[in-house]
Amino acid sequence: MKGLRIYQVLLPITLFALLCSQLAVAEETETENETASIPVEELRLFAEVFDRIKSAYVEPVSDKKLLEDAIRGMLSGLDPHSAYLDAKAYENLQVHTSGQFGGLGIEVGLQDGFIRVIAPIDDTPAQRAGIQAGDLITKIGDESIQGVSLNEAVDKMRGQIGTRVTLTLMREGIEKPFELTLERASISVTSVRHRLLETSYGMIRISQFQNNTAEQLTRSIEALKAMGELKGIVLDLRNNPGGVLQAAVQVSDAFLSDGLIVYTDGRLPNSELSFSATPETAAGDIPVVVLINAGSASASEIVAGALQDHRRAIVMGTDSFGKGSVQTILPVSVDRGVKLTTARYYTPNGRSIQADGIRPDVVVEDARITRIEETAGQLRERDLSGHLLGEEHAETNDEADEMLGQRDYQLYEALNLLKALNILRSDKG
C-alpha cells in the first residue's frame, strides 16, 4: 500500500515532466511538416487545466479519475460509437455478444447529448412496455442523463433482476415527455424465430446478430422446408440493431452462392477486410423479401445491402438507420479496453452505409389498413336469377390475409410481393 501511495503522488509529477519534455523538444525542433509537429499549446493547456482542477476544485479529485475522464472525453469526442471501456463495461460487452445479460432490452446510441433508442429487443421489458425506435431517453429515474456517456447510461438502466426503473422519454409526434416504468429482467435473447405466414410462405425474424445466429437461421430454413413446399421467405430485420459482423456475413452467405458480401476500408492495413460467399446455401433459390426500417442498423444493414446488390432479394420497408462503421475492441490492460471506430462498411457495389443507410427497393411505410364495407345491395353474377354455376375452387385465405394486414401492414405487403414473384416464376416455367 505504501508503494501504491508513492506511485499515486508521483503520477502528476511524472505527467508534468513528460509534458514539459515534449514541450521542450517541440520548441527546439523545427519541421517542414506542420501536421507532424507536437501540439505545443494544446499540451500546455492540458497541463494547466489538470493543475487547476487538482488545486482549485471544491473536492479532492484523484489523478486516476482525472486521467480516465480525459481518456473518455478524448474518445467520446470522436463519434458516438467510440468509447473507453473500464473493467465493468469491458465485461458487459463480452456478455452482451454471448446473448444473455440483465437489464431492460434496449439497444441505444448517443444523439445530441441524449440517449436514443435504436431498437427494443424482441420479447423484453422494453418491447412489452411499448418503447419504440427513435425514442429519446432524457431521464433515468429522477436523474437527467443529458451529457452522460453512453456506457454510464447503460449501467444506470441495468440492475438487479426484479427491480423497477422509470424512464422519461421524448417521442416524435408527442408534445410532452412521458414516463414508462419497467421491471428489469434477465435478457436471454433468441435471435432467430420462424413461422408460416400461410401455406408455402414463411417468415424468419432475426432480432439481433449473435455468435450462433447463422446456425439458428439454418435450422429455421430447414424447419420451414419440412412443413411443405416453400415458395418464399420474408426475412424480417426491422428493429434489428446489429451485432457480430461474422454473423452478418454468415447469414448473407445462407442466401448467396458467390460474390462479395461486404468489405471495410480504414487507415490501418488490418482494417481493410473483405468477405465473400461460399458455394453452399441453405436457402437455395427461394424468393426472398427483406424487411427493414429505421431501427435496422449495422449488421442488419450489411445483410440487406448484400442481398440487394446481388439482386438476391427485394428490400422493402423504410430507410435503415445508417450505422456503417466498424468498431474494434483494443485491449489496453487485462480488464480494460478501447472501443474505437477503425473503418467503414461498404456493400458489394461500393455503397457506404454510414449515415446514408440502406434504401429499400419498395418503400412501404408502417400503417394500418381497414376494410371498406361493400355498398349495400350491390349485385354480383351469383346474385342474378338463373346464373350458371361455377367450378369448385379451393378455400382462400382472405380472412387470414385481412388479419395480417391489420396487425402488420409491412409484413402483409411483403407476403403479397412474394406471391407476385412466384406467379412470374411459374409463368416463365
Image (cartoon, grey):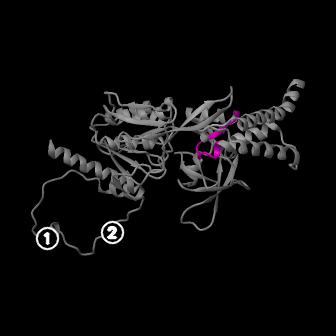
For the point 90% across and 25% down, which residue is it?
2
Q: Position of residue 51 (x, y in %)?
A: 83, 43
For the point 83% across and 46% down, which residue is it?
53
Q: Is residue 252 visible?
A: yes
Q: What element carries label 1?
A: loop
Residue to which mark 2 is pinned: 372
Question: Which quarter of the figure is the N terminus placed in?
Answer: top right
Q: Nearer the viewer, residue 285 or 202?
A: 285
* Mark 1 → mark 2, Cα distance in angstroms: 24 Å
Q: Position of residue 125 (x, y in %)?
A: 59, 48
Residue to which mark 1 is pinned: 384
Q: What stretch is highlighted in magenta?
A: 75-87
Q: Earlier in the sequence, mark 1 or mark 2?
A: 2
In the displayed structure image, the side of residue 123 where residue 165 appears, left or right? right
In the displayed structure image, the side of residue 226 where residue 186 appears, left or right? right
Is disc 2 surrounded by few (<14), some (14 to 19) or many (20+) residues within 10 Å? few
For the point 15% across and 67% down, which residue is it?
381
Amino acid identity at mark 2: Ile
Q: What element carries label 2?
A: loop
In the displayed structure image, the side of residue 346 where residue 184 appears, left or right? right
Is disc 1 surrounded by few (<14), some (14 to 19) or many (20+) residues within 10 Å? few
